[in-house]
Amino acid sequence: MRVVVAADGVRGDTLAARLRHEDADVRAVVAASAPAAAALDAMAAPEAAELLAELARADLLIVEGRAATLTAELVAACDRLSVRIVPLCARTSDRRLAASLGLAAHDPDAPAAELLASPPSSLPVEPTRGRVITVWGAQGAPGRTTLAIEIACALSSADHRVALVDADSHAPSLALATGLADEGPGFAAACRQAERGTLTVAELSRIASTLADVDVLTGLNRPGRWPELSHARVLAALEACRGWVDDTVVDTAASLERDEEIVSDLVDGPRRNAATLAAVEAADVVLAVVAADPVGVSRFVRNWPELRAAAGTAPVRVVVNKIRAGALGVDARGQVRRTLERYTGVTDVSFVPWDARGTDAALLAARPIAHVAPRSAVPTAVRRLVAESLAPRRAAEAATRHSLRRLARSA
């Protein structure tokens, strides 16, 4: 069997040696991104044309499967050349990408004989459905965007892919807070393509920006473009995100009012708050942010019935942000907890303390607090929130490992 290997560094040479041990005819070993680049533009360089010519003579292309190396253009080119693609995928998100392109993913350390074997007649598609976590808060800058960024960073790991989405139709700020350019299409482009039915996993990866290990769909670069974020579009885009990443963290605006439906005669007319309502409706979990001061708590209590109605059956986790004694006096946490329990019936509350130094450092650097001040009280509290409310399985496993270590030390 004639094989082309596309893998970076030593991995490519090691894999080629394993394949030759199974009597495969390895025709070329190239960089992981070379086949995708050649399929996109065969005239970009002489090496690209030579690689396509080699692929035309090959039976099999083994390539590292990730968004930059496994593209729809490459799959189409290999289909025309009758070349079978074997993607090597280490992450769950990469396996979903391969499945969306109709390919069976393989582990990077799979035996060479398995990689060379003919696939079964029907490829099993791994059933996966990512989560949507919507971050909402009442008017008055309670810290929705800051917490959305920190939660996305806390959830992200090598085997857990996370996306951060700016669905704020009033004052989008994710791009500013993270130092990302907002000239790109971002979430509005995802919504337009979702309406046409052309939003794929590969397209989401293409239009997203990158913040460390988090994929970011930036918001509107001009708030006047808010009609682009219609209710149906936002629902469709977030549904597509479920097949793209494990968790989608959505930053929203504050207003949940539906007055536009009363004053407008257009049944399907644009609604300024449609994006927020759709994001809350689509959520698997809603994080409701409360500013820890008398005005912030009062605004949250007034908006609680609307939030609860919009969320439907989705669980709502209340997060009190910027907690400090200076604004509430003695026993600030107890005062907020008792007030929320009395007026909303909420008893399960998480607290995130106020850290002016860490927050200012993050704003100055346009980076997450977890990146510029990892020991700050804010990312510490967010990691605790994630472990207790958003990743209970991982927290339980960590607790089990801690208990086993204690038992081993005491034995």
Image: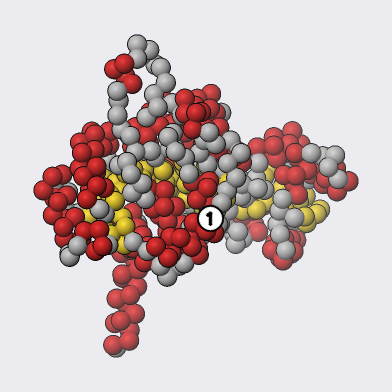
> Which residue is at 30% across, 42% downward?
138
User: What amino acid type is highlighted by mark number 1?
Assistant: Ala
Secondary element under disc 1, as helix, strand or loop, is loop
In front: 325, or 75? 325
In front: 393, or 316? 316
Relative to 14, is 121 on the left or the right?
left
Label 1: how many residues lie within 10 Å, few (<14), some (14-19) or many (20+)?
Answer: some
Is any atom of residue 213 visible in this view?
no
Question: Where, quadrant-wise, is the C terminus in this rendering?
Answer: bottom left
Question: For the view shown, which residue lies furthest in the right direction?
Answer: 46
> Which residue is at 70% across, 40% downward?
74
Q: Residue 147, how many percent across, how many down?
A: 39, 53
**Where is mark 1, residue-wise?**
366
> Which residue is at 80% across, 54% downward?
28
Q: Residue 288, how many percent across, how many down?
A: 29, 46
In front: 20, or 208? 208
